[in-house]
């Protein structure tokens, strides 16, 4: 039996057994060994790589066209943790996706790749042709740069990249329409939003953030998660007993906000306070993005705040312990910070203040910020360390206020009133042009004068809510400072929050490339 391809006749093994879907699905190492055998026999290898979250006719035509370019068609799929296509993706697990691809007659081998790109696969398999669909042909649409890196890898291995011209269909569109875990309210919102704003407008809005010079001012917090396994009730007394498993540390508080902002704005300064007894400064600087400049002030008598949370085996938070942070800012330290602010505030286009109420931002610092900031975005978080003592009205003014619903109601002293009316009252009191109310599963209400924009929650799957409000403040505040329309600012902030809740605490800041991919998936 012979297969003619591009002017060459290649001998295939006539005694090779018929492959079954189960035998075609193999580990990446096994697929590399399979490819080595193909090379030895002189067979021409074609490689396709993708997510294939919903196998449809466009995929099938693409794979069939790829098969015609060689003697063996190998397919690798992106593993579940590396699929960055937006909310609740992938819909189908890697095992189901691989099983579907392996069932196709034109496919000779399938493996799962636990990397963000196919570069490692290309280096292992050394395909003669690496095939992508026509929707990847425009280099300017490659926001990740992965296609360029994959093309360089295949050419370095002696192969070439090929773009099929088959009719394309969007898995994301089909999944959003028929399989999405997001509700009807999200689909209706997206449809209306698309009618008002196209991709070009949204991308231009994001690009406007890059040139902002931003100052982030707020409490420095180290978050610790101590993971445990439940042992049940102790033998004596009604006390829960757990077995310690492992721990993880995160750069939280204003550090997390600065890192979110630094993904979108090129020049970011973080101003915060450290305790001289235990500064944790090395850990903090190590976890700052490269374009964040740190301006730290230290109180020798205090400790940098550490919040230690104990996590149960079902990912629930059992209890929390505070270490340090109380009365962090001394009178001398306040004077130094206020002087620095008075001298430098004018140079910043935006000042973003995640005020966690843990002893860093004093009333004197508040006065300096409100007096000198050209654009001031503020959140005053209510937490167990300040409940009942910390509200947004300690600020005489702000341009943008971001609060969750309990924080807003506490500031107004109104438990049951209409939320839009309360938001309008607080915004007017602080002379704020915009006020956002984050409402968890009910999304975000963006108040703009007498108008409001309701944005539903954009994530159906929640891993951890810690830091979601900070992510929203970071991106929405940046947008409003750049005069991006309020509904776009709220949408962008909501995407940032949705991305944040799908990871543990502040493990990773919002990545601008994944942000664009998330946005593109939502809008398909």
Image: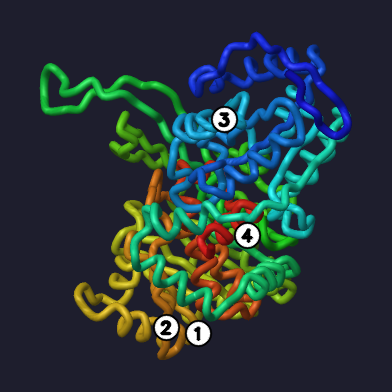
Badge 4 is on which residue?
261
Query: Tag 2, which secondary structure?
Result: helix
Q: CA distance from mark 4 to mark 3?
A: 48 Å
Tell me the tag on residue 105: 3
Q: Position of residue 96 (x, y in %)?
A: 45, 33
Q: Are marks 4 and 1 in contact (CB under 8 Å)?
A: no
Side of 344 relative to 245 (left or right): right
Q: CA distance from mark 4 to mark 1?
A: 21 Å
Badge 2 is on which residue?
427
Q: Position of residue 81 (x, y in %)?
A: 52, 36
Q: CA distance from mark 1 to mark 3?
A: 60 Å
Q: Are marks 2 and 1 in contact (CB under 8 Å)?
A: yes
Quadrant in the rendering for residue 348: bottom right
Q: Residue at x 70, y 28 (%)?
A: 121
- Among the two numbered marks 4 and 3 on one chain, the one whose residue lies closer to the N terminus: 3
Q: CA distance from mark 2 to mark 4?
A: 24 Å
Q: Which mark is in front, 2 or 4?
A: 4
Tell me the tag on residue 433: 1
Along the viewing direction, whichever of 289 and 461 lies nearer the viewer: 461
Q: Position of residue 250 (x, y in %)?
A: 52, 40
- Among the two numbered marks 4 and 1 on one chain, the one whose residue lies closer to the N terminus: 4
Quadrant in the rendering for residue 168: bottom right
């Amino acid at each position: 039996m012979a297969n003619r391809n591009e002017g060459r006749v290649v001998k295939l093994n006539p005694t090779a057994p018929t492959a079954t879907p189960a035998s075609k699905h193999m580990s990446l190492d096994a697929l590399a060994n399979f490819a080595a055998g193909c090379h030895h026999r002189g067979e021409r290898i074609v490689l396709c790589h993708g997510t294939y979250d919903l196998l449809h006719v466009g995929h099938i035509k693409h794979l069939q066209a790829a098969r015609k370019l060689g003697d063996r068609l190998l397919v690798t799929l992106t593993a579940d943790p590396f699929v960055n296509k937006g909310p609740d993706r992938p819909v189908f697990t890697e095992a189901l996706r691989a099983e579907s691809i392996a069932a196709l007659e034109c496919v000779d081998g399938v493996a799962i790749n636990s990397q963000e790109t196919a570069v490692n696969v290309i280096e292992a398999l050394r395909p003669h042709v690496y095939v992508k669909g026509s929707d990847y042909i425009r280099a300017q649409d490659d926001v990740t740069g992965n296609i360029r890196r994959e093309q360089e890898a295949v050419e370095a291995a002696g192969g070439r990249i090929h773009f099929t011209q088959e009719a394309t269909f969007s898995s994301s569109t089909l999944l959003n329409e028929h399989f999405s875990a997001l509700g009807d309210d999200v689909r209706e919102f997206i449809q209306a939003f698309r009618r008002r704003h196209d991709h070009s407008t949204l991308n231009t809005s994001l690009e406007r953030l890059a040139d902002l010079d931003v100052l982030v001012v707020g409490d420095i917090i180290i978050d610790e998660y101590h993971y445990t396994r439940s042992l049940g009730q102790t033998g004596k007394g009604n006390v829960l007993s757990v077995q310690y498993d492992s721990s993880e540390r995160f750069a939280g508080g204003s550090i997390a906000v600065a890192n979110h902002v630094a993904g979108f704005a090129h020049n970011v300064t973080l101003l915060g306070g450290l305790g001289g007894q235990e500064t944790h400064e090395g850990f903090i600087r190590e976890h700052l993005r490269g374009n964040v400049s740190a301006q730290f002030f230290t109180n020798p008598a205090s400790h940098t705040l550490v919040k230690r949370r104990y996590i149960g085996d079902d990912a629930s938070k059992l209890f929390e312990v505070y270490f340090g942070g109380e009365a962090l800012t001394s009178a001398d330290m306040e004077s130094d910070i206020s002087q620095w602010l008075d001298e430098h505030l004018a140079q910043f286009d935006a000042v973003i203040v995640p005020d966690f109420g843990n002893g860093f931002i004093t009333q004197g610092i508040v006065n300096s910020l409100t007096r000198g900031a050209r654009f001031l975005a503020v959140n005053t978080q209510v937490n167990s360390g300040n409940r009942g003592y910390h509200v947004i009205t300690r600020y005489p003014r702000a341009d943008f206020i971001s609060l969750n619903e309990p924080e807003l109601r506490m500031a107004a002293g109104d438990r049951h009133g209409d939320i839009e009316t309360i938001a309008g009252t607080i915004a007017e009191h602080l002379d704020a042009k915009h006020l956002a109310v984050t409402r968890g599963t009910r999304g975000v209400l963006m108040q703009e004068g007498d108008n409001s924009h309701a944005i539903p929650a954009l994530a159906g799957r929640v891993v951890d809510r810690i830091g979601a409000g900070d992510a929203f403040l970071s991106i929405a505040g940046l947008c409003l400072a750049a005069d991006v329309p309020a509904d776009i600012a709220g949408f962008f902030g909501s995407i940032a929050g949705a991305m944040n809740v799908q990871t543990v605490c502040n493990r990773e800041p919002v990545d601008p490339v994944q942000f664009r991919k998330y946005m593109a998936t939502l809008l398909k």
